[in-house]
Amino acid sequence: QVRLVESGGGLVQAGGSMRLSCAASGTIFSNNPMGWYRQAPGKQRELVATITSGGSTNYADSVKGRFTISRDNAKNTVYLQMNSLKPEDTAVYYCMRQGNYWGRGTQVTVSS
């Protein structure tokens, strides 16, 4: 059974940084594309960043140049490094594995 567990969320001031982690189990992690999505109150879930099994990345325009997705296949973990955070980055952040597998999410709150 595929299991994804996010961690690293919390409260940070605008301009600050935060790193999210997503630990995967029950899957051949290295073979699968992974992604981070987010959902703000009253809004639809949206793509933040994705990374292929080969390490190619893709970002939403709103986070380009500020966020970096990476993966450590030895640790079955995908990361999201978030810099220069803005209040509009406040959301629940979800880890996703190809095949529509989702974690429960971690709250990120950016205060102004």
Image: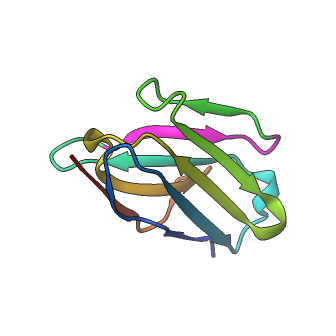
Looking at the picture, how far across and down is residue 98, in whole percent?
A: 62, 49
Question: In the rendered view, does 91 fall on the left or right side of 66?
Answer: left
Instruction: Report the residue at 40% width, 55% height from top.
Output: 93
Residue in front for this viewpoint, 79 or 33: 79
Looking at the picture, how far across and down is residue 97, in whole percent?
A: 60, 54
Instruction: Report the residue at 55% width, 31% height from top.
Output: 59
Question: In the rendered view, does 43 fall on the left or right side of 18?
Answer: left
Residue in front for this viewpoint, 29 or 12: 12
Instruction: Report the residue at 33% width, 43% height from top.
Output: 89
Image quarter where the N terminus lies is bottom right
Residue in front for this viewpoint, 10 or 6: 10
Q: Give yes or no for residue 81 being in the magenta stretch.
A: no
Instruction: Report the residue at 67% width, 34% height from top.
Output: 57
Q: How is the image coloured?
A: rainbow
Vertical order, 35 against 77 (above or below): above
In the image, farthest residue toward the left: 42
Please report the bounds of the magenta region as a residue range: 45-54
Q: Give yes or no for residue 46 being in the magenta stretch.
A: yes
Residue in front for this viewpoint, 15 or 30: 15
In the image, farthest residue toward the top: 61
Vertical order, 112 against 104 (above or below): above
Vertical order, 98 against 67 (above or below): below
**Mark count:** 0
Question: In the rendered view, does 47 fall on the left or right side of 12?
Answer: right
Looking at the picture, how far across and down is residue 6, in whole percent?
A: 51, 68
Main SS, magenta residues: strand
